[in-house]
Amino acid sequence: MELSEDDLALIQVLQAAPRLGWADAAKVLDVHATTLAARWDRLASQGAAWTTAHLAGDPKQMLLAYVAVDCEMNRRDSVTAQLAAVPEIVTVEEAASNRDLMLTVITRSLEEFSDRVVSHLKTIDGLTKYQVALCTRLHSSGDDWRLNVLSRSQLATLRTLAPQASPEPAQVAGQLPQSHLDLLPFLARDGRATAAQIARALGRHPATVQRQLNRVLASGILSFRCEIAQRYSSFPVTCQWFVNVPAGQHEAAAAEIRTISNVRLSASTTGPTNFVIIMWLHTLADVMSAELALQQKVPGIDIVESAVMLRTVKRVGWMLKEDTTASGAVVHAGNLGAAD
């Protein structure tokens, strides 16, 4: 299948506001709400696009880590499958670099990271080495990435309809009662899940679940996103850079990097380098162009290493097929949802 301009426009609307009602989406796209709902059902059923919710990964509230893994070549498939089955390992990618696999991990604390992830890494046969970089500041993530197909007037209308993010800092998951955390796996599987749908699954009264859902949404512990199968995005190449940015210039660097439309993630980290950047690109030739743009926009940046991803096995908790479409399987962290 190929995605039409109308499909891409709908996906961008949901990128900006994953839980926007169809009536409001219709105002943006000037298409009947039932038509948009049917279009979305088709995209989702084919794995071309999906909505999800994941732990926000704000380092002030929880732990976000990037882990490079080496493994024995003849056990790579087994190691990859075992890593993808770990709920706290939210993204698994195969890399064309001196790192075999790149992992993104979200846990509630450093202690939980050690207990649930590092201890598990040590038990996997064929995994020979791992290296951890802890995120100290998340500047931008895949939630912020857009297809950029909407017109200016459509974007203006969307801004008036999309809910604004709460200025309040995110709570930690432990501050919400278990009855509220029970909702998170449903939102991981479907970021647009309604209170009525969740209530039926949990056997609770819809009004009760609506109050719980409102509190979860207001808590800020979750990030919602609309994902697109990368093959349909016009940006089939993923490249990750490990760079050094001069101390005290990270915020300024992040602001400049955000002006590059291809950027999927930028973060300050611990480890051999102090900054990570991920972009989706049209072609491999764009890797050099992207590096030139980084050097022009960020004075003093030192690009230490680049890694092109061969395949994404798991993204934001969702297992992907070889063609980058969603398989429908979601590996979420128990009562804490999924996360990238």
Image: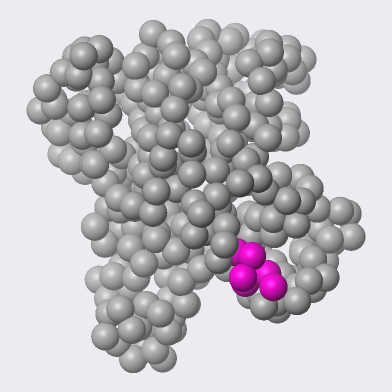
Question: Which contiguous range is marked in magenta?
Answer: 35-40
Q: Quadrant of residue 139?
A: top right
Pinpoint residue 248: horizontal percent, then vertical percent.
60, 23
Pinpoint residue 277: horizontal percent, then vertical percent.
56, 26
Pinpoint residue 56: horizontal percent, then vertical percent.
45, 51
Residue 336 sits inside the magenta stretch: no
At 49% across and 38% down in the image, what residue appears?
324
Q: Main secondary structure of the magenta part?
A: helix
Which sits in the foreground, 63 or 238? 238
At 49% across and 44% down in the image, what residue appears?
325
| Left or right of residue 217: residue 166 | right
At 46% across and 71% down in the image, what residue appears?
193
Which sits in the foreground, 99 or 243? 99
Residue 223 to residue 147: above or below: below
Which sits in the foreground, 135 or 208? 208
At 51% across and 68% down in the image, what residue appears?
192
| Left or right of residue 315: residue 173 | left
Whether residue 222 is visible here, answered yes or no, is no
Residue 36 sits inside the magenta stretch: yes
Q: Quadrant of residue 167?
A: bottom right
Pinpoint residue 270: horizontal percent, then vertical percent.
41, 23
Whether residue 7 is visible here, answered yes or no, is yes
Residue extending farthest to the right is 153
Residue extending farthest to the front is 1
Name the image colouring.
one colour
Residue 221 to residue 71: above or below: below
User: In which quadrant will I find the C terminus?
Assistant: top left
Instruction: Please state the total of marks drawn on the protein image.
Output: 0
Residue 15 to residue 280: above or below: below
